Amino acid sequence: PLEDLRLVNTFYQSIDGGLAHGASWNLTQTLKDFEYLRTISMNDQEQTILKSIGRQEKLIYSCTVAAMQITRNSVEKQNRLRKELIIQLRKDNDYRFYDQWHQLVGRMTHEDAPWYSARHYPNSWELDDTYGPDMALKRMRRCPMTVDRRFLMKESLPEGFAEETNEREQTPLLGYLFSNDYRHEYSVEDQVLYTFTVRKTTPSHELECECIITSTELVLKPYEAGELEIYDLHDITKIWTKRYEHQESAVEVFLKCGKSLFIVFDRDPSERDTFEGFFHDLVVRCGRQELDQHTQQWREGALSNWEYLMLLNQMSGRTFHDLMQYPVFPWVLANYDTRTLDLLAERSFRVLEKPIAVQHRELEKHYINNYNHLRQAESGDPNGGRRKIQPYHYSSHYSNSGTVLHFLVRVLPFTSLFLQYQDDSFDIPDRTFHSLQTTWNLASKDSPTDVKELIPEFFTFPEFLENQEGFEFGVRQSGEPVNHVELPAWCNGSARVFVLIHRQALEANIVRRQLSHWIDLIFGYKQTGQAAIDAINVFHP
């Protein structure tokens, strides 16, 4: 102990020098001093750490929140995927297997597939109802010939056409895999939220269906003949409200695949409100403010003339599913009889400020007199109780089902619709759409009852100008057979060149400067009232 004490004293002396100054040393006091110094040092370190934390507090908080959000998103995504997997496994019933078999057969039997058979595969083409860019229909798909052989030219008939067709109808390729009616094989697995009685409408048919909305699907189940249709709710991109037969009772449902469904709620129009309420986030509501925004974009050049016109057609309720409300486009060119076309010259274009029937000033008097005569007849009618017809300039309309079928008569399925429209016969050859020059002359000056405007296909779809299926339209009085549409000389006989130049003409600066006047006539304030009378733009009600 004495040696230890000496060692401690020496240690203390070497550190503090206390003995040199005559101070007494105490071990307890020294330990207290050490503890005090340690406490001060720890407090200083703690304060330094707290200050550092304080300076980085916002960054630490942001990192913490971000980490929590990432964790939450990961968990939610895992739960969603797990739920979708469970739902999908639960829904793999007989109908799903049927649909998968149907798709597999389609992939294995088309023209470039290993099981292709020309005898059983459709050999005709029809317009596909899948929208392309800018809401244009311009894709073709294979289909069976649905028009009777007596309406086809002899040289276009394949050898043994009748026998081949009958055999194909009786024994479709791998047809034994599918039952005739598989609707009973589908059962709703999810909770049914709503059911409606609706009509699914296309240009070729109307199908009365039960519309079933579950938590994951939209189902259209036909009451009679027809195929069951099932769409995932996640595949619906937007919904436009539409009119049908002058009633606010329809919607057009757009899908990710590019197709759309036209659904009519004709039994109870209030059901459409319920349907819209369920899909309220997807319903496109274009009021005055939205229209002004799109118009400003068009004025600034952010929207092309085509895009703006298609948007106006959509907003006005027009649709490719209803021939009576088919999208309408203007005649833009007035030159169809020269070998060259100058898109910088105003003489090459129609006058968009006036309706198509009064492109020539001398024709205005005829239609004004027609309107005044009907107005005088109305005011002088002694049968005041009888329903009166409002006076008008034109007895026909610029767009209706007859106009659409007149232009699309060479394309399936519109050929079949035209034959139904004409009591199972084509029109008189001289009245059939056979020449752009003739059609322009009739609409602009030669016929007081022909006031047709154009359809979108004139700017996107050259196939409608060609008689690719070989339909027999007859022979005109001049002795010339009606086959392909006669095109202007400036497109060198090519339908594709015509459509390309025609689309270029639609986007020309001359058209952009005047297009607003035509829009006023068709979609705007010159449709009704005194403005319509002054513009010679009143049609038969």
Image: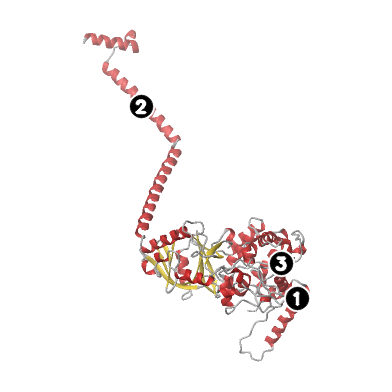
Residue 450 position in % (x across, y down): 68, 75
User: In this picture, is 96 found above or below 373?
Assistant: above
Q: Kindly identify the residue that appears in the image at 46 percent across and 75 percent down.
A: 268
Q: Kindly identify the residue that appears in the image at 36 percent across and 58 percent down.
A: 87
Residue tagged by mark 3?
A: 352
Cα–Cα span, label 1 and label 2: 102 Å
Name of the residue lying farthest toward the front: 159
Question: Who comes first in sequence, dot 1 or dot 2?
Answer: 2
Q: Camera-side residue: 271 or 479?
A: 479
Q: Please, what is the three-letter code of the amino acid marked with disc 2?
A: Met
Q: Camera-side residue: 346 or 257?
A: 257
**Tag 1–tag 3 contact (CB < 8 Å):** no
Residue 437 position in % (x across, y down): 72, 69
Q: Camera-side residue: 100 or 504?
A: 100
Colour scheme employed for the rendering of this structure: secondary structure
User: In this picture, is 307 found above or below 430?
Assistant: above
